[in-house]
Image (spheres, grey):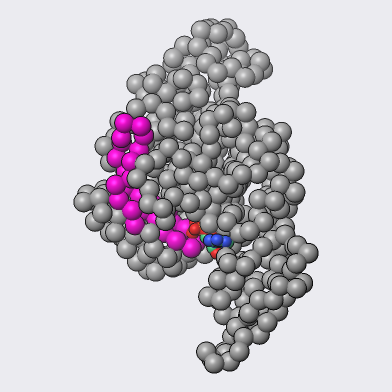
């Protein structure tokens, strides 16, 4: 999904997740970005994709960044960072100016977009993405480049994603403690889409679901761009905790059982297949309890069903279900659970596949799976023209993504 030639020589991306923190350092290569430094680390101090303990989170982030910097032999000054939680369902906003019958010129375009950039948010929220999805003149819609056309009113629809200011501040403070500036905040499912989706899909409409440890985030891409994003504070860790409670087994055992034997679709052999379930408080010599696998499936399945039901509801409510296409791509560590693809296909009634980082060289086998799609997507974002204008807490609105209109070059020179 990388377009145009990368103009930057080194980028840093930090994915602060509920389960892991990952730092990628990349350089442009002939064919796209090449990873030259990787650091990843168990995450601490993060709940449902939001930092809840700055001290602990900073420690995890510092460790991951140091490892990546050491491998790259370079020091970072700023990074692109994701938000898995703390952002709100995106919405379409419109701004409008009077043309009074004139032809649309560059200055009109600048004016209407600027109005759109300074969207009013409710107090305590800031816009992190503002992407134009179409211009209209006197009500005739779907205009990609209005220049040269004339009319009475020029309007632009922009797709806006807003996040809680406190969440943004905490991420910025956390990175500040690592002596890094935030170049841009990127909603996780946007980043994951940039790395895991193919262009044909994003053109005709596709839904991406990033299934993490503490969040499940959703995005819809259409006509080459993001048109919807949302986040649900439920993830793979909830499944593990359900197993801990349901089978009275320690957390590490629950995690092991989930990844090795877990499944979210029942099968006819589940009653006969017995699994060992060490009990909380057992010592090593105590023989493990044995239960049919159907118990485990009976705990896992409802949580995943609930998650996909919520995803379906959010898509229905968004009004973007029609654009969301026939295909769903799943990313994130939690999509690796056995049966997830089938269950998603059943509940969402779409074709489902698993997405991994694409178009990026130098990933180690351990970082090339679906859990790293968001991290890799942050690198794509950083190299694209999307990141040309740094978005920071001081200027959180930033410029939207012009690429789809073929206007970005003009805008870069003129705004
Ligand atoms: N093979 C597997 N089968 C099932 N679940 C798995 C597997 N491997 C990892 N997971 C689950 O994936 C989750 C972690 O995924 P990921 O690394 O994408 O999360 P994260 O990005 O840190 O979290 P978030 O994006 O929600 O903040 C954990 O809940 C883990 O149990
Ligand atoms: Mg994640």
Residue pictured at 36% horizontal, 34% vertical: 32
Q: Report the side of 212 relative to 65 (left or right).
A: right
Q: Nearer the viewer, residue 93 or 329?
A: 329
Residue 142 position within the rendered picture, expressed as x and y whole percent measured from the top left:
62, 19
Residue pictured at 48% horizontal, 51% vertical: 369
Residue 122 position within the rendered picture, expressed as x and y whole percent measured from the top left:
56, 46
Q: Is residue 18 magenta?
A: yes
Residue 80 position within the rendered picture, expressed as x and y whole percent measured from the top left:
38, 46
Quarter of the view holding residue 223: top right
Residue pictured at 47% horizontal, 58% vertical: 17
Q: Report the side of 200 relative to 414 (left or right).
A: right
Q: Is residue 408 visible?
A: yes
Q: Is residue 120 visible?
A: no
Residue pictured at 71% horizontal, 63% vertical: 301
Magenta segment boundaries in residue numbering: 14-39
Instruction: Give above or below for 378 relative to 179.
Output: above
Q: Main secondary structure of the magenta part?
A: strand
Question: What is the quadrant of the C terminus in the image?
Answer: top left
Q: Nearer the viewer, residue 31 or 415?
A: 31
Q: Report the side of 412 relative to 349 (left or right).
A: left
Q: How many marks?
A: 0
Q: Is residue 245 magenta?
A: no
């Amino acid at each position: 999904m990388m377009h145009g030639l990368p103009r930057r020589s080194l980028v840093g991306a930090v994915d602060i997740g509920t389960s892991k923190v990952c730092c990628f350092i990349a350089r442009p290569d002939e064919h796209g970005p090449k990873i030259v430094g990787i650091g990843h680390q168990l995450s601490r101090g993060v709940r449902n994709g939001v930092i809840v303990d700055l001290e602990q989170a900073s420690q995890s982030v510092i460790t991951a960044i140091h490892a990546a910097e050491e491998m790259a032999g370079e020091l970072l000054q700023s990074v692109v960072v994701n938000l898995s939680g703390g952002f709100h369902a995106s919405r379409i906003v419109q701004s409008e100016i009077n043309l009074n019958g004139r032809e649309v010129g560059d200055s009109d375009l600048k004016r209407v977009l600027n109005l759109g950039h300074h969207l009013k948010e409710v107090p305590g929220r800031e816009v992190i993405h503002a992407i134009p999805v179409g211009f209209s003149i006197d009500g005739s819609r779907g205009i990609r480049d209005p220049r040269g056309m004339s009319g009475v009113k020029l309007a632009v629809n922009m797709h806006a994603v807003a996040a809680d200011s406190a969440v943004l501040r905490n991420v910025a403070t956390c990175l500040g403690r690592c002596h890094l500036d935030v170049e841009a905040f990127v909603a996780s499912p946007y980043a994951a889409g940039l790395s895991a989706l193919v262009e044909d899909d994003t053109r005709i409409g596709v839904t991406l679901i990033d299934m993490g440890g503490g969040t499940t985030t959703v995005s819809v891409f259409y006509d080459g761009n993001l048109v919807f994003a949302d986040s649900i504070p439920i993830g793979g860790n909830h499944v593990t905790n359900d197993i801990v409670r349901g089978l009275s087994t320690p957390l590490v055992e629950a995690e092991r059982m989930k990844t090795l034997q877990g499944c979210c679709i029942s099968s006819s052999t589940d009653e006969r297949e017995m699994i060992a379930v060490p009990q909380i408080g057992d010592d090593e010599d105590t023989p493990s309890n044995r239960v049919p696998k159907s118990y485990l499936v009976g705990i896992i399945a409802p949580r995943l069903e609930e998650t996909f039901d919520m995803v379906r509801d959010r898509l229905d409510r968004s009004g973007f279900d029609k654009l969301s296409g026939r295909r769903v791509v799943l990313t994130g560590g939690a999509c690796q659970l056995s049966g997830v693809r089938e269950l998603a296909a059943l509940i969402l009634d779409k074709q489902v596949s698993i997405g991994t980082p694409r178009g990026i060289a130098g990933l180690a086998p351990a970082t090339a799976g679906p859990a790293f799609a968001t991290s890799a997507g942050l690198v794509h974002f950083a190299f694209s023209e999307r990141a040309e204008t740094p978005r920071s807490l001081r200027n959180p609105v930033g410029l939207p993504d012009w690429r789809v209109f073929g206007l970005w070059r003009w805008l870069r020179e003129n705004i």
